[in-house]
Image (cartoon, rainbow, N blue to C red):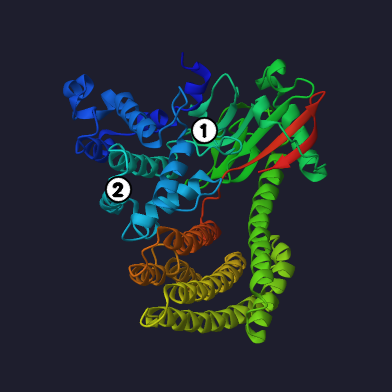
Amino acid sequence: MVDEQHAAANAEIYEVLAACRNDELAPLVNALAASPASFLKISRSFEMHNPDHVQYADRIGDEIYRLGVLALSTKDAGRPSYDFMISGLCRKIGVPTTADTDRNEAGLLNMFAVQHLGSLRPEDRQPVVDAACLAASAATAGILSSDAWPPFAAALLQTAHLRRKLVAEGRMPDGSDGGPPAVLADPEAGSDLYAPLVLQTEDGAPVLSVARLPEARTAGWPVNGGGDVLGALAPILKALQPLVAAEQILKDGNFVRVGIEGGAAALSYSKKAGALVGSAQGHKGQIPFFAVAAGTIAWPAALLMLTTAMIEQQKMEAIERGLDEIKLSLRDVSRFQKDERRATLTGSIRYFGQVARPVLSGELSTEVLHEIERHEAELVRVQDHLAGDLQTQLDELGALKKGGWTSSKYVKAIEEQMTVIVRSFDEMYTCIRARACGYQLLAAYPGRELGKEARFEDIGMAAERYSPTGEVTVALDRMLRGKLEGISSYETKALILGTENALFDTVGIASSEILAGLADARSERLAPVWVDFRLENGQPADVRLG
């Protein structure tokens, strides 16, 4: 008898297929139906529902697991786990495996793809995945191999692509703790679990929400003190008591989340309106808050103070986080950089760190502005030098030819050149991050809109040029794959492509963070912020900031 708990734990493929649409399942069905070793095409479910693949998604999963059991020759009575099947395919082909299934998936897909999937737009990837699946299928075929291997390899790679696509689009969890949900400021998103109270403008725009946190979101609670924030929120929570049942919010030791929409620019009490009113972004004049009677919130100034403080804190933390990341990057690459470049980068970072808090607090001196502009000019010069160095390194990679070299020497030359190129990408993004931090400070100054727009576009173009879909990165991928055509060992290819995969991951994260930071710095509508509290006797005791 199959262990039911074991079977439930190894049902990952069913979860992937259940989240897919018909058009997403079609390539997987085609890969299975094309093989005589697959029974899918002769199944009753296929005959009844094809091409409505969603209707028989479980049957597709059954077939993948059946082929997997035959190909991997498993002796376990239950279904093999997804991790086991991915690592089994790696071993069959001769690709090194790691404990990280995500890395193993990426390694397999990009081993057989004619172009790194990260260098393509999501809508352009499926044809490349289809070709990669055919190549993987051919690589597993052989006289001594089970007939189940080719269709299993193709189906498993299609499934791996679907899983990664669903995770990237937020349609499937990636297995990590995604943190607290970002739905509390939405009046339509209330549930019994969080029991949110939402204050909103007359037209329904949310401004403030208060809700209980479930136990799952209270683990590892940090004791920060947070005196200033606690002091500002204490009267607000007290004033909200008439609107919230005591057993829901003010229970001893309860955990509470307060979400604040950054769009609330000003709040005050209006005798004429008999309510708390505010100027919301995108509207003219003052708008009374919906369902908030006169005197319900006794401290509108406290709410304004908290909103302002939290928005400033959010901006400050974003810049400080960027500066910390730059410092870490510098620590790794400083021994390779020329002294002048390193001095320029470290000097800019140190200065931005010194002036960030005063600037974001409203101290907008002309002297500081001039220094920000001076550092920008120096950083642009460093960026141009780094771009020239990187292009030279790409040319040197392109000039490598197997010729009379032994395979081992040829491979070593490629690996060494890739190490130099990866280092240059790191240095480039360190410089671009520094420029982005300078822009975030520049954005705090009023006026100079044309200059700000030009700076924004130039930094954005630099980040995109070295992103996974950027021209420099795409050229590197094309060149590297051309060099690997002369190497027959999948193990050797996997090691070199593993370096490229890590580079794509790094530049993908870096470019996204830089572009998001630039957009936030010039956005007229600030992102919502939230604060979590631990209450004792109805009073805030500890706090953690969002």
Point out the residue furthest to the front here: 144
Q: Which residue reaches farthest top?
A: 1
> In the drawing, does residue 161 fall left or right of residue 324?
left
Residue denoted by label 2 = 133
Picture coordinates of residue 316, whole percent (x, y): 67, 57
Decide which of 153, 141 is in the foreground and name it: 141
Binning the other alpha carbons within 10 Å of mark 2 as few (below 14), some (14 to 19) or many (20 upward) gives: many
Of the pair 403 and 183, the residue shown nearer to us: 403
Number of labels in the image equals 2
Mark linked to residue 186:
1
Residue 327 left/right relative to 59: right
Judge by depth and name the residue closer to the eye, 533 or 282. 533
Distance between mark 2 and mark 1 Cα atoms:
43 Å
Instruction: Tell me the amino acid under the disc marked 2.
Output: Cys
Q: Give, as a three-letter code, the residue at label 1.
A: Asp
Where residue 426 appears, as percent x and y from the top left, is 56, 70
Question: Residue drawn at (75%, 27%), measured in percent from left and top?
Answer: 238
**Residue at the image position 19 percent from the left and 29 percent from the top:** 41
Residue drawn at point x = 73 percent, y = 41 percent? 544
